[in-house]
Every structure is written in structure tokens, then in C-alpha cells.
Amino acid sequence: MHTQLLQAGSAGIGLLLLVCGSSAAQKVDLDKFNYDVSYIQLPREYVAPDQRTYGVRVEASPMIADSYPSDAVYQKIGLSGYEKVERDPTVGVTIKLADLRFLKSDIETRTEQVKDRDGKVTGTNYYYRQVATYAGQGEFQIRGPKAGEKPKATADAAPANRFLAKATSNTDVPTITTVADNNLYRVFTYRSGEYRSVVDASRAYRDAQEVIRRNFINDFVNLSVDQVNGKLADLYGYVPISDKQFLWILDSDNHPEYAVQQEAIKAVQALSKTMKATEPLTALTNDLQPLIEYFESLKTKYTKADKPDRKMRYSAFFNLGRLYLLLDQPDKAIAEGKGLMLNDYDTGDGKRIIEEAEELKQRLAFHHLAERHMKL
């Protein structure tokens, strides 16, 4: 009897170990693994490809032009995807750079207590520095087509063309309107080194005034150029972008899917490096198809309602949604986002994929494109 109990106990312990071992083997830990993405960032406004020209006019005060020639400013204004022309541009930008203004000057004082070996205060040292504040001022204006607006008649508009009054062809021209009118304003502060007297601090500032002025003018113009280029790109530019995205990949090395998942992410990382913003997605789409089929298979392979299986399905829906966004296939990404939400594990990611896909779909339609990859 005693032997039978021992045998039964041993069998029970063996079964418990087997169950625990099986449970441990199915543990699902997901980690983020990055991959590269490249695409053309699409602007807010649409201009037909054959009309993508831009022009620049720089108006700089003599003080600004003396330190930073207007031609140098002109050369630094760029609009990706457009040709720079001297006459009749579709998009025009005017930059006005006024003088660098002196605002105020102050003396800053710092005190330092002098102590003996016993820590007793025996005196005070005074340090002074000159602080001067300047402001660079200007403005810029961008003019170009704006979606949904029609030309407005003005009092000094030219009379209607009598020869086109009864024409049935579409003779509309792109609407030209001011789409950006912004101030260029920057405050700059000079601080001298510390001196033991106010006179020395003031002298250091006085001797360096010319260098200070030129340096602040250069900073002001460069920051203004960056601001103008940023606004131009946001409104009209087709700008190549390189970024990082991530997939959720199994990182539990005792899970039977682990080895395949590691191969999968390495393949995605290798293939994504071949992506170029200015080349079509045809080859990449074909190359990623085996990976898409693999992630799709996980939905029917892990069908239980428990947490480990739901996490595996979550990673499958999420990864497919990201890959379809990578391939500029928003409708398929939306379907994966909906599936992710129905899976009921981190539904917020599903909502985010759907929102991103809807925005991508609208942008592509607005710009008459099938994908965010094109020659510029």
C-alpha cells in the first residue's frame, strides 16, 4: 500500500512538472524590434506635377546684407520636388529681413564669500558680466494654390476675356492665394565673461560689439531660412523622409515560435533597408509577401481565448497593419486594425493603425497617388 502511494505521488509530481513545463514553454513575451522606413512626406496642398515651380525674392536691409548677402539667402531657400524659376512661379515666397535691433544692456553681479580655514567669513568677492539683448525682425509670405478656394474678383481685376465668354472648355487657372504670412523674430542674448570690475566687463562688450552683431545676424538669418523652408515643405514640398518603425516580435526563447519570429524580424529589417523614397514599392511588396503570409497564419494557429494566444494574435494583427502601412496599402491596414480591436488585447493600437491608415488614404487620394514613393 505504501509503495502504491509513493508511485501515485511520483506520477502526480511528474504530471505537475509536465504541465508547468508546458505552460512555461508557451509563455509569450513580446518586444519591440525596429526597422527602417523611407517615403515621400506629402504636403498639405496639391500642385499638379507639370506646374511644380517656385520662386524666391529676398529683401534685406543694408545691415543684414552687409553680413549675410541676399544671394546667399536666395540659394538656401529650397522646395523639394519643385524647380526654382525666375519668372511666373506657381509657388512664390518673399522674405523680408529688417535690421538687428539693440534692446537693452545690463550688468549681472555674482558674489562669492571668502572663508578662512575655520569656515569664518572674512570677505566677499564680486564678479561682473555684461549682458546685452538684441532682436532680429522680419517676415515672410508664401503665395500659391490652396485647395478648395476659387479666385475672388477684385476691383482692379482685368475685364473678362470676351473670346472665352462662351467657351465650354475648362479654362480655370490654379487659385493663387496667400497661404502663409509669418513673422520672423528672434531674441539673442550676449553674456561677457566674468570680471572683477564693471569697467572691465563693459570694455569687453564694447570691444566685441562688431563680432557680436555679425554673429547674431548670421544666427538670425539661418534660423529664418530654416523657418521658411520648414513652412514651404509643410505646405507644398514632397520631402524624402527616413524614419524608424517597430514590430512586436516574440522574445520568449522557449516558445516553439521563437526561432521563426527571429528570422522574420531579421528579414523585415534587411528588406526595409532596400526601401527608397524615390523608387516604387513593387519589388519590396513581392519580397515581403512570405512574411505577410507567415503573420497571417498565426491568426488561425493560435485560436484560444487565453492570454498567451491572444498576445500572439495581437502581434500578428499589429505587424500586418504596420507592414501594410509600410507598403502604402491603407485599406488592408484598416482591416488589420479592426481585427486587432476585435481580438481585445490592447485595442488602442488598433485604433491608432486605423487612424493612420485613414489619414494616409486621404493624403494619397488628395495627391492623386497610389503610393508615397516617386521620382522627384
Image (spheres, grey):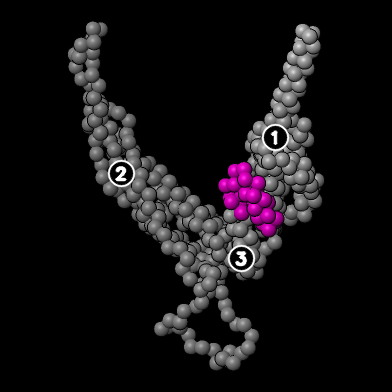
- Foreground pick, 6 / 227: 6
Rounded to the nearest angstrom, the CA distance separating label 3 from label 1 is: 38 Å
Q: Which residue appears at 34% of the width and 41% of the height?
A: 189
Give the quarter of the figure containing the C terminus.
Answer: bottom right
Say what amino acid the circle numbered 3 marks: Phe
Q: Nearer the viewer, mark 3 or mark 2?
A: 3
- The residue under label 1 is 250
Sequence-first disc among 2 and 1: 2
Do the numbered discs 3 and 2 sit on residues whose CB atoms are within 8 Å?
no
Q: Nearer the viewer, mark 3 or mark 1?
A: 1
Q: Quadrant of residue 183?
A: bottom left
- The residue under label 3 is 366
Q: Is residue 105 visible?
A: yes
Looking at the image, residue 281 lies above or below residue 153 = above
- The residue under label 2 is 133
Looking at the image, residue 156 lies above or below residue 320 = below
